Image (spheres, rainbow, N blue to C red):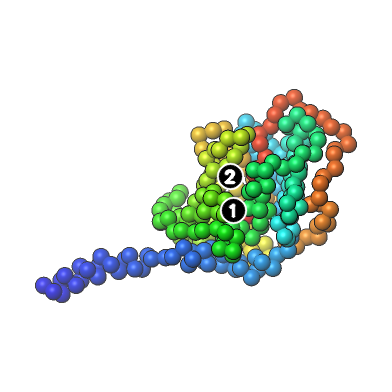
Amino acid sequence: MKTGILSVTLLLFLPMAAAAQTADEIVKKALDARGGVDKLKAVQSERVTGRIAFARGVEGTFVVELKRPLKMHVEISVEGQTIIRVYDGKSSGWMINPFAGSNDVQPLSAEDLKNISDESDFDGPLVDYQTKGNQIELAGKEILDDKPVYRLKLTNKNGDIRFYFFDASSFLLLKWEGIRKTGGQDLPWESFSSDFHEVQGLKYPFRIDQGSPGTDIKQTLTAEKIEIDPQIDDARFTKPSLPKAPAIPPSPAPPAPASPPLSN
């Protein structure tokens, strides 16, 4: 009888022990899956070029340039107009958005600047997450598109919460979800990563589908080229110049992505 009880007890506890993972273990495996912390930190600049598609058949191109520390230059061209978004890596950022009815250079809002370090950090939120003021918790294991995934809860230094879903086999990031401010509103937001390829020893998703569930706000970003350590002049991250020939389109286009694509 005692042997039978012992066997049942082991059956109850062994599966749980085998499946046990801590948040830090998952973070390490996720970073290793990308290529490792050392390789990620060794990258000094990145340039991603590709195509972007919005709802209602609106399409265009994008270029994202990133350089340490936290410098960012984003250009999105749609319907003959170009949105430019720049951050100098310190405390200043600017935007030119002809779809807002003006080609003037505007300073980024206080809300944008509050979150800009997340957008311009091409290491992603997991690298040195404690130093960045992020907190990470393991929120469980579940199924996403027929795949077992680990769900991590990340709370950043501003108190914003996101959930990250990592493939339980490859430990690549498949999805994140959270809240994004769009047009003065806080909207639920989700982003799906797929089509992973290796570029100079690092894994990148070459397709990102993102948007607000239950709305027509949707974007698909498809990378055509990812460059590691391209030469980028620091002038690219200063206040941009006004376009030579301003033109205002007849109707507004969908909003530009709030964060650079193709980064964890």
Q: How many neighbours does mark 2 have within 10 angstroms: few (below 14), some (14-19), or many (20 or more)? A: some
In the rendered picture of this protein, how many numbered marks are placed on residues?
Answer: 2
Q: Is residue 42 left or right of residue 142?
A: right
Image quarter (top left, top right, bottom left or bottom right) of the C terminus: bottom right
**Distance from label 2 to label 1 (Cα)?**
11 Å
Q: Which residue is mark 2?
A: 209
**Relative to 67, residue 250 above or below:** above
* Residue 94 image offset from top left, x and y in percent: 76, 44
Rendered residue at 47%/56% (across/down)? 152
Rendered residue at 81%/46% (across/down)? 239
Is residue 61 visible in the rendered structure shown here?
no
Image quarter (top left, top right, bottom left or bottom right) of the N terminus: bottom left
Q: Which residue is mark 1?
A: 195
| SS at badge 1 | strand
Circle nearer the N terminus (2, 1): 1
Say which of marks 2 and 1 sits in front: 2
| SS at badge 2 | strand
Rendered residue at 71%/47% (across/down)? 50
Furthest residue in direction right, as rendered: 244
Task: Tell me the tag on residue 87.
Answer: none
Q: Is residue 116 left or right of residue 180?
A: right
Rendered residue at 15%/75% (across/down)? 3
Residue 187: image quadrant is top right
* Residue 210 image offset from top left, x and y in percent: 58, 43
Q: Is residue 255 left or right of residue 137?
A: right
The amino acid type of the residue labelled 1 equals Asp
Is residue 243 visible in the rendered structure shown here?
yes
Q: Is residue 15 left or right of residue 132?
A: left
